[in-house]
Each structure stands twice: as C-alpha cells, then as structure tokens.
Amino acid sequence: MEQESTLAQALPSLQPSQRWPVLFVGHGSPVNVIEHNVWHLTWRDLGAELLQRYGRPQLILCVSAHWLTRAGWSVTGAAQPATVYDFSGFPPELYQVQYPAPGAPQVARELAAWLRAPRQQKTPALTVDAERGLDHGAWGVLQPMFPQADIPVLQLSMDYTASMQEHWALGQQLAALRDQGVLIVASGNIVHNLPTRRYGTGINATYRWALQFDDRVSNLILSGQLEPLTQFAQWGEITELCHPTAEHFWPLLYAAASVQPGDTPRFFNAGFQMASISMRSVLWEAAA
C-alpha cells in the first residue's frame, strides 16, 4: 500500500487501473503501415482485441529502436507530437501517413521526475524533449492497432551508451505503470540485419543463423527466463550476424523487464520479412 501511495503521489495524472498487458512488436519495414499484409492485419486485429477486452488505456508508452539518446534517457513532452518520417526512399504515400495522437506533457514531466536513471549521473531524473515527435517504430505499429489516434502517446528514448543491465533496470521501473492504465509497447526486431535482406521472400524464408537466434530468444521467453536476454551480446558470432548493431533488440529488454510474476506470453507474427528481419512479437498479460 505504501508503494501504491508513493506512486500515486509521483504520478497524479494517472489513475490506478486493472493491469495492462505489455507488448513487444517486431515492426519491420515502414511500408507495413500502408500495405495490408499479414503483419499489418495482425496488428489491426490485436488492437481491436485489446480495446474490447481492456477498454482504452489512459496512456501508451512506446520504446522504439529509432530513438537513441546519449548519456541519459528522454521522454517526449509535446502536446501534439509530430509524425516523424525517419527514413528515405520509400513510396510517396508513406510520407502522407499521419498519426495525430495527442501527447501528455504533464505525465511526461511526472515520469521524468519519477523514473530514475539506472546509474549515477549528474542529473538523476530523465529529461523531457518537447520537440521530439513519434518515429516510425512507434506510429508505424500504433496506426494499425489504434487508428483513431485518440489515446495519448509518450515515447521513451534509449540511452545508447547504457549497458544491457541498465536498459533492463529502467525497464523494471516501467512495470509499475501497467497498474496505472499504461499500455507499454516496445518496438524493435528480434533479428535485424538489413545488409542481408532478400526482397520477395515468403514469411518462412530465412537464414539458418536467423532462425537459430529467433528460436533461442523465443525459448527463453516461453520458459520465463527473461533476464538472460540481457546476455545476448555474449552469444557469439550468431549475435553479430543477427544484430550488426543492437538497437533493434534493446526494446525487447524494456518489455521483458516490465513483465510481472504470473504473466504469460503469447507470440504473434512469428515469421520473417525479407529473410533477415524477425517479425516475432509477444504479448504478456496477467493470467485470467
């Protein structure tokens, strides 16, 4: 009760609620938002399912592979965050997509003061970035899931200088938000190697190394061994093949760290896009 009281004092803009699920979404190519392919349709159906079962969350907190900050974490603070087109060379209609979900500046300030940086820094609280919009790792999956764009969205950056344990430690703090009406959506990919992508492949076409890595991660998730995911960089050459750079894996650590005892995982979109991008996604929720 004391912890709940402290949280209520720290985050007065959020009200206690039923426990919301946490999502890790493999987002893949930005064009998934305009192509009604299997990934897009599954996101659409999942969003409808969540609204039917849980109602509307008070807030969506998104952690995307596409917002990296240095020597600290930030949270978006705009009242109307812009739709950021952080890519090039795609069809013109993709640049016409808008996701005008409102922000939540007051909640952003409260979160920035409440969340603690996992290591000793000159400024222990997070910073609020009032200029930052939502990148395609966020709006690219939220638009199919919640097309009405009427749920406030905040985005949390990832500190690219942080260790895996520090990413995990901040993710653990997010767990309490699930009881405050917050849907956590982490957006990345379990396997992400763009130089080896192959166009025109089916969802089951992939490389042996990609399949092995994807299987290893999914087995850890199914067995409830989540913290060992922080050791993925020590898995040898297979990690170098699956993640030439690691930022697409890091969001999984934030989602997994916010899992509560008794939560059960459910996979969706288990397949590959362009052979070297795992679209495997997972929903954790409390047992009924």
Image: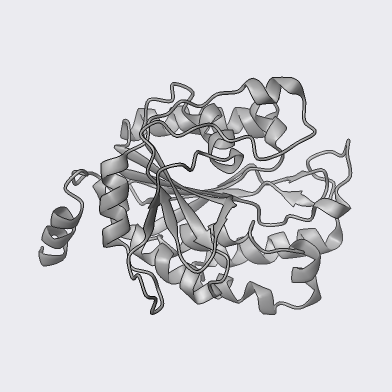
136 versus 97 height, above or below: below
The colour scheme is: one colour
Q: Nearer the viewer, residue 134 or 201?
A: 134
Instruction: Examine the rendered structure and indicate whether residue 158 appears above or below residue 37.
Output: below
Nearest the eye: 198 or 100: 100
Count of numbered labels shown in the rendering? 0
x, y percent for residue 29: 72, 39
User: Is 247 situated left or right of 174 in this image?
Assistant: right
Q: Name the image quarter holding residue 113.
A: bottom left
Residue at image position (70%, 28%) is 37
> Where in the figure is residue 132, as x and y percent of width and height?
48, 43
Q: Is residue 261 visible?
A: no
**Seen in the image, is 120 located left or right of residue 83?**
left
The x, y position of residue 74, in whole percent, is 43, 56
- Residue depicted at 56% across the width and 36% down the height: 141
Q: Position of residue 198 (x, y in %)?
A: 89, 44
Residue at 83% across, 48% down: 275
Task: Look at the image and tell me in which quarter the N terminus lies.
Answer: bottom left
Q: Residue at x 41, y 34 (%)?
A: 50
Q: Could you tell me if residue 288 is visible in this image?
A: yes
Left of 4 or right of it: where is 66? Answer: right
